[in-house]
Image (tube, helix red, strand yellow):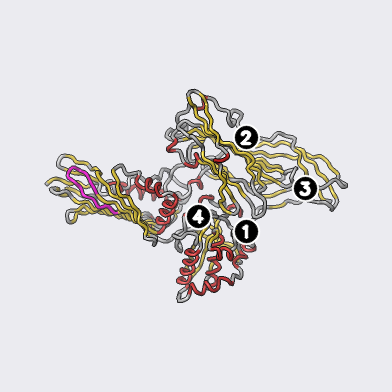
Amino acid sequence: MKTIFTIVATVATVSSFAQDVKFGKLSKQDFEKTKSTIQADAPAEVLYADGNYKVSFNTNQGGVEQTKKVFYRIIVFDKDKTPDDVLKVEIPLYKSSGSDQDKLISLKAVTYNLENGKIVEQKVEKKDIFLDKVHRFMDKQTFTFPNVKNGSILEYTYEIISPFYGSTDTWYFQQSIPVVASNLTMQNQEHFNYQQDLRGAFAPKLTKNSKDDTFSTTSFGNRGVSSFGGNMGNQGATSSNHKLKIDTQTYSLTNLPSYSREAYVLNPRNMLASIQFELASFVAPGRTSENFSTTWERIGKDLMDHEEFGRQLNGNNFLDETVNATIVGKSTNIEKAQAIYNYVKNNMAWNDYLGQYTDKGIRKAFNEKSGNSADINLMLTAMLRKAGLDANPIVLSTLQNGLINYSFPSRSKLNYVIVGATIDNEFYLMDATDKNAQINLLPIRAINDRGFMVNDKGIKEVPLRNSVMTNDKISITADLKADGTLTGIFSNVRDNYFYMFDKSEIADDPKAFEKEFVEDYNFEISEFKTQDNKQNVIRHQFKFDDVKVDVAGNKILFNPFLFVANTKHNLNLDQRNYNIEFGAPTTNTNTVKIKIPEGYKVESLPTEKQFTMPDQAGGYAYKVIEKDGFIIAQAQKVIPYSILPAQYYKPLKEFLTNIINAESQQVILVKQ
């Protein structure tokens, strides 16, 4: 005999929506707020955020489903400074390789303005809602709020029915703006045991309750047996009623500041107060427990057995001719690896899709010369192996996808593939999806703490670190007049990691890049231009006029580093419990050459400075001299690591404070 469970809801759905906060229910008093009660200078504030995740049996269609309901109310104080992620909303929609997919069953979004004493609303129309493909397993629905002004209130709410219940979306209590109140409710029937992944510095208040639902069990013979909720017919069926407990957990936080704009954090969202749930086990009455908890070793084995991952590395005789032609004349293993890497990088086009599995398969991707990260980097792995090199795929979570919870193994967080290769006892990281990447120089999306290298022998954690030194060189040549005005040329040469970053920003919006590059300079700038030598070096240059320094009687006083002196470090915490992320080892060199005005001489120069961080984790040198009628200032800061552990936070703050002090010194010229 087999027992089938049909759930019949008899209890009203538990909702965490506050009784006095309903979508569309606003009064004139709601518009009276003119600044945040949490951070007075905030450009906007989340007044209320509510999420409700519910996992239950679908009695009509069979199977298990997850319902996601989300509601936000936001007030805007300064539209121009409000972050884009507030004004433009993205809703992820997941899908499988089959027909299963999330269904967005409702979406409402409205901008409210108070005009002439009346509340005027403007809805987001269907024509202004767009569906974009992110990768094979995810689309996103996007919309932008219309007619947003200072004082606008924005609301949106949506509901998704999902066939995927192995995990929930991550709920972020903290946002890029302050949050007055944020609630997340997780509701599931007692047979489903979910494990929480709670992160961040704020502990939410937890409220638990349980209610009874009614369900019926129907017993059948062997014929007609199906899964839970399936249509069994009524031949010989026996039904009985039982009670089922519904567990509800509500997590609440209030008066949350926006996340601190700390320096050297590649993805601030990794540090935010958040929660996610993963299915750990399922226990049905009369059945043994089904355990969904796994191990990284199991995940590695499953990946290597998967048709769209590990099995892609088998055979591939179609690659032989290309590999042989690519490595001809290459005598060392690293030369062979470099040649194959360059071939894949230069001949394959990344389609911007993520994913731990191939989108096309490497044969089709090879023929079409395009694919997702798994297509391209599994192809690179296969080609390196055909050249006799020890290469294996590495699966990871991209920077925007968030950190992996290493203590709770789950493949759902893995969404990207790169390559690890051991060549002549040295380990190298490779990602051929980016034309500007190099061996041991990964694009920023792939730098997210650690990944997992997998092969037929098992799985191994590997740190995701760039080791190629990156240079940022600023040079200024200027003429100083007796009235204290300067004119000159600014040049900034950047390579490697900074080159990749600038190229990406310029490709997205060249005008915005230029605006952001020069916006901190409060003087006249002309002839801004960017030169790209196509060999991982980029130069930004502009001319400047009417930069003023102090004139006091017969003396001219100025900072020799002018407008490029370090004046702040944006490390604002007393201590930090997460890594210090630079992206790559970096060398910053500033050189300024200022012509002394005729009739003036040097009265005093800054003191030379040199110092280091503990364990040589950073070094700095500063020197200002007079030579041939010029003041020549040079400073160099070297950080030889892409990541430093959190225990270096205080030494780094001290190091950067010393740099600020060094670069606050002045040159004094006196009239002869």
Q: Are marks 1 and 3 in contact (CB under 8 Å)?
A: no
Label 3: element kind: loop
For mark 1, what is the residue?
A: 299
Secondary structure of residue under mark 1:
helix
Main secondary structure of the magenta stretch:
strand
Within 10 Å of disc 4 (Cα), the crowding (few <14, some 14-19, many 20+) is some
Pick whichever of labels 3 and 2 is earlier in the sequence: 2
N-term-proximal mark, 2 vs 4: 2
Q: Which residue is mark 4?
A: 449
Q: Residue at x 43, y 37 (%)?
A: 80
Magenta range is 475-487
Q: Which mark is residue 230?
A: 3
Above or below 403: residue 121: above
Q: Nearer the viewer, residue 527 or 277?
A: 527
First in sequence: mark 1 vs mark 3: 3
Instruction: Identify the secondary structure beneath mark 4.
Output: loop
